[in-house]
Amino acid sequence: MDSEQMEKDLRDRRLKQFETYRAEDKHECSLLSSRLTALLTSQSFLAVAAASVYAKLNPPENTRIVTGIAILAFLLAVVTSLAICIGCNVLRRWHEFGGALLKQDEDGDQRRILRGFHTKRRQVDLRHWLSMDWLHAFMPFAFGTAWSVLVGFLHGWLSWPPRNSWRYGLFAIAILFAWLLLMTWILFHKWKEQLKPEDFQL
């Protein structure tokens, strides 16, 4: 096989690897967007339902129903946040793959095939880290915190002067802190070894 054919094969293989990376990158971004949309839709619906129930029914019936809605909304926020964190973790692995692909292209003897394709994207970049990972992950966390505060006010656990506020406050803080730790662990945990270009000999 002559050198021209070898260079052509290398170019074709590297471009296919790049196309795989780009396709997976777009796929994961689309999944993150759909999860966030589902969160906003469900939380908006439950918030309207809670407000309507609280306005139309009398205590203590309205308090019980709104508390049930708040617990459901809190659980949905937790599940969605974990799904988003897992998606961000997978997306980061693909970005690392893109960086490795570009490094392999730059370190090779052949001319740089992928120059200008903007493949060197890593989520260690602070701007991308804040705009993607933490924005998506903390939105459900914010909803969950708001619902927990609402439940506290409904039952007088966050009233003034405080009666048993410290008990509910400690319990809520413990739950929220455990949730935050779990999110952080999922975001940064290395579930699998980093993807490498040689894993995709297409």
Image (spheres, grey):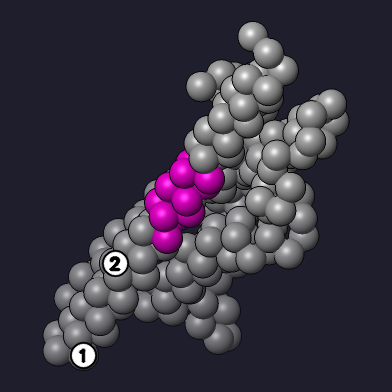
| Residue 28 vertical placement versus 15 (above, below) | below
On the picture, is 185 further left or further right than 136?
Answer: right
Q: Which residue is the site of mark 2?
A: 42
Q: Which residues are magenta?
A: 22-33
Q: Position of residue 91 (x, y in %)?
A: 56, 44
Outermost residue on the top side: it is 1
Q: Position of residue 150 (x, y in %)?
A: 42, 76
Count of labels in the image: 2
The image quadrant of residue 77 is: bottom left
On the picture, is 110 further left or further right than 187?
Answer: right
Q: Earlier in the sequence, mark 2 or mark 1?
A: 2
Instruction: Give the secondary structure at mark 2.
Output: helix
| Residue 105 vertical placement versus 84 (above, below) | above
| Residue 168 vertical placement versus 18 (above, below) | below
Instruction: Give the secondary structure at mark 1.
Output: helix
Q: Residue at point 57% right, 85% down?
A: 161
User: Of 200 and 147, which appears nearest the observer?
Assistant: 200
User: Of 152 and 48, which appears nearest the observer?
Assistant: 48
Q: Position of residue 53 (x, y in %)?
A: 18, 81
Residue 29 belongs to magenta span: yes
What main secondary structure does the magenta stretch of the protein show? helix
Nearer the viewer's eye, disc 2 or disc 1?
2
Q: Which residue is the site of mark 1?
A: 55
